[in-house]
Amino acid sequence: MTIRKEQAMHEMSLAEGVLQLIDEAGKREGFQRVTGVWLEIGKLAAVETEALRFCFDAVTRGSIAEGARLEILALPGQGWCMECAETVPMNESLDACPRCGGYQLQVTGGTEMRVKELEVE
């Protein structure tokens, strides 16, 4: 796998953001160690999951999440087709409507990334 520098920087920033959320939750909830992290990532979120895994391992070294298992749950992309007046599945943000072939689609889901769950000690 080849990772472009720009892509790796994007995923590094995302991994650092996840670690910040974990640290804040640890302080608030009083846990000492995180053994598992579940992330929901939309198909249209422009996140390279393998690069994110690599960056997550790097940024968590020496933290309460060092060695934590990272589980990524993929969320489907979806959009509203203005021609069909229906919600349709989307694989890419510039795809044609799978029903009518038109390109008047507005993305309505699958762009998010969030920490869904933490397994802690």
Image (spheres, rainbow, N blue to C red):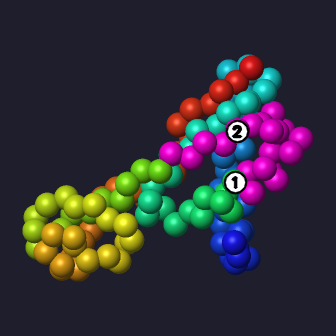
The answer to whether 48 is drawn above or below residue 96 in the figure is above
Pointers 1 and 2 in contact (C-beta within 8 Å): no
- Which quarter of the rendering shows the C terminus? top right
Question: In the rendered structure, which amino acid carries the disc numbered 1?
Answer: Arg
Q: Secondary structure at mark 2?
A: strand
The answer to whether 107 is drawn above or below residue 31 in the figure is below
Q: Secondary structure at mark 1?
A: helix
Q: Is residue 20 left or right of residue 104?
A: right
Q: Disc number at residue 34?
A: none
Residue in the foreground of this view, choosing between 111 and 72: 72
Q: Residues within 10 Å of mark 1 (few under 14, many from 20)?
A: some
* Residue 9 in the image, given as x and y percentages of width and height: 72, 68
* Residue 7 in the image, given as x and y percentages of width and height: 66, 72
The answer to whether 28 is drawn above or below residue 38 in the figure is above
Mark sitting earlier along the chain (1/2):
1
Q: Residues within 10 Å of mark 2 (few under 14, many from 20)?
A: some
Identity of the residue drawn at 82% across and 53% down: 58
Residue projecting furthest to the front: 1
- Which quarter of the rendering shows the N terminus? bottom right
Question: In the rendered structure, which amino acid carries the disc numbered 2?
Answer: Arg
Tell me which segment is drawn in magenta. Answer: 54-73
Identity of the residue drawn at 10% across and 68% down: 84
Residue projecting furthest to the left: 84
Residue projecting furthest to the right: 62
Identity of the residue drawn at 57% across and 32% down: 117
Q: Disc number at residue 53?
A: 1
Can I make out residue 103 in this image?
yes
Q: Is residue 29 left or right of residue 107?
A: right
To which residue does mark 2 refer?
69
Can I make out residue 21 in this image?
no
The answer to whether 79 is drawn above or below residue 115 in the figure is below
